[in-house]
Amino acid sequence: MKIIKPPFHRALNQSDFFVDATIKVQAHESSNYWIYKTGDWVYKVKKPVHPDSAINLDELFCKEMQTRLELSAKALETSVYLLFEEKEQWRLEPLLASGNQRGYYVLKQRQLSERGFLASLLGKGKLKVEQARLLGHWLADFHAQLPPGTNKEVGSPEFLLRLLNDDLYQAKKHLGKPLTQGQLDLTVRPFEQHLKEVKKLLGQRFRKGFVKPLQGDLRPSKVHIAGKTVLALALSGDPLKNPEMDLTSDLADLTLALRKNNLSALVDVLVEGYIEAGGDTGCKTLLPLFETLKALKAGLKCSQEAQEEPHTEALNEAKAYYSLMVELARKL
């Protein structure tokens, strides 16, 4: 992606601006950040939002990201800096040392190798059995750190059915090429029936502490494996909004990614590792429900992308997710 140059871009591209740079600075851009890769470290400059707000939302955003990454990716060594202009020169200082300066908030993190991301491992067919088990262990250990949930409603059958119906309503706008009414019918009925069968279990899960704030964004492009270390990048959309849910929802992010890549055998290994490390046997019963929800949402997202900017790849991805949704619903 070609970077839209911010006012400080030229300064940050100077060879001596980052004292710890080991390569020529590489600039990139995402929806939330201007990104500068310097070798061992990456600097993510937060794009400002709501500059007139009485509350500094950019500072809150970065601090919340730092807090969450302490739980899900401690080895990233994430810290918050402030980038500001002083006497016509740009300076970068740790937030606590920057005084009352106004500027751009920056996340400094260890740079991760692209080949270690789960997306790369899946794309190249290189995910190993021991890595799948490691993912299960890591997720259970991560969940054990989270505080208990406070909203009983999010663990109810009614709430899960509402999630399904909300996405179905949006998905119906794409009936035709990627989705058929038959696929919707084959999904809804078994989903509703299974919800009735697990109503008691869902109620028990809230009381036993299996409803918590989620990690919420365990896409393959966000999960990194290096040796026996797993890191998960924090939710990039808005870390201040992290809904509570049954923890099986996080597990479904990972298992659906494996199923999408025809790795059902490794799904079993991952789930066994999760149960082995955390003792959550109930997740196996609920997993097909959450995988069905995730497949529907992923298909809907791809359908919307194909509609906004028509291209065959997004349409094929939507079809694949909807087919997987029906396959999962049949197992309910």
Image (cartoon, grey):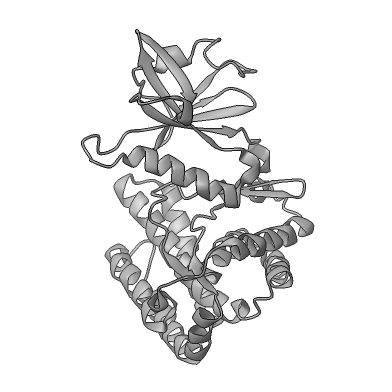
163 and 96: which is toward the camera: 96
The answer to whether 87 appears left or right of 265 in the picture is: left
- Residue located at (33% from left, 25% from top): 102
Residue 296 image point, x, y percent:
43, 67
Kindly give the residue lying farthest to the left in the view shown: 52
Asked if residue 232 shows in the view, the reply is: no
- Residue located at (70% from left, 70% from top): 268
- Residue located at (38% from left, 43% from top): 60
The answer to whether 271 appears left or right of 100 in the picture is: right
Residue 56 image point, x, y percent:
31, 39
Residue 28 image point, x, y percent:
47, 27
- Residue located at (43% from left, 27% from top): 82
Query: Based on the displayed image, in which of its 4 quarters is residue 297 positioned?
Result: bottom left
Query: Based on the displayed image, in which of its 4 quarters is residue 302 positioned?
Result: bottom left
325 and 227: which is toward the camera: 227
Asked if residue 27 shows in the view, the reply is: yes
Q: Quadrant of the N terminus?
A: top left
Count of numbered labels shown in the rendering: 0
